[in-house]
Image (cartoon, helix red, strand yellow):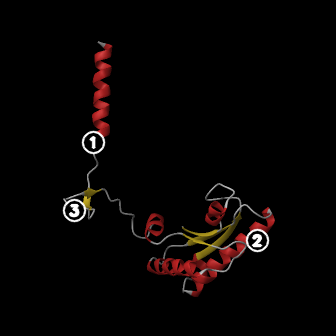
Amino acid sequence: MKLRVLSLFAALAILTACETAPTTGDSGAGKGAQTTVKQATPGSKEDFIANVGDRVFFDYDKSDLRADAKGQLDKQAEWLKKYPNAKALVEGHCDERGTREYNFGLGERRAKSVVEYLKAKGIAAARVRMVSYGKERPAVLGSNEAAWAQNRRGVTVVE
């Protein structure tokens, strides 16, 4: 009897796990294909990350903004203008090479480059703070150029 009851619960659990979530929108794949789309609330942290992008990258031992970083920061500035109540914390990060002290200074210079660019694009200084994490918070673990390139970054965190 116990085996029969357990079998029934197992079958029910399997059927429940197979249930599909309601779908919305056409994926463009044709033939009525449906996809589940979760929209971020406009003006939220999730909206900023998903629709704008929260990070820019730096070259090795540099704190000057690259052309691609400026393009990304232009998008961030436009979003911040659209949502004037949003504030931001800009984090400066480094790869693992160099001393802890040196990387804190480099991270600060990177964060400052981002903040100064956003201010030049019309974002009030009172809306943007900065912090350096140096090499203490890597985005990617590893001791190779691919990992280091992802860790040399400035991240804009919407508050």
Residue 99 is labelled as: none
Whether the residues at callouts 3 and 2 have beta carbons within 8 Å, the answer is no
Which comes sooner in the sequence, label 1 or label 3?
Answer: 1
Q: Nearer the viewer, mark 3 or mark 2?
A: 3
Instruction: Write the residue at 51% across / 81% down.
Output: 74
Quick check: 134 left or right of 127? right
Q: Which residue is mark 3?
A: 30
Which comes sooner in the sequence, label 2 or label 1?
Answer: 1
Mark 2 belongs to which amino acid? Answer: Gly
The Cα atoms of the two marked residues, 3 and 2, are separated by 53 Å
Q: Residue furthest top?
A: 1
Whether the residues at callouts 2 and 1 have beta carbons within 8 Å, the answer is no
* Image x and y of residue 136, in percent: 70, 59
Mark 3 belongs to which amino acid? Answer: Gly
* Image x and y of residue 113, in percent: 65, 79
From the image, which quarter does the C terminus lie in?
A: bottom right
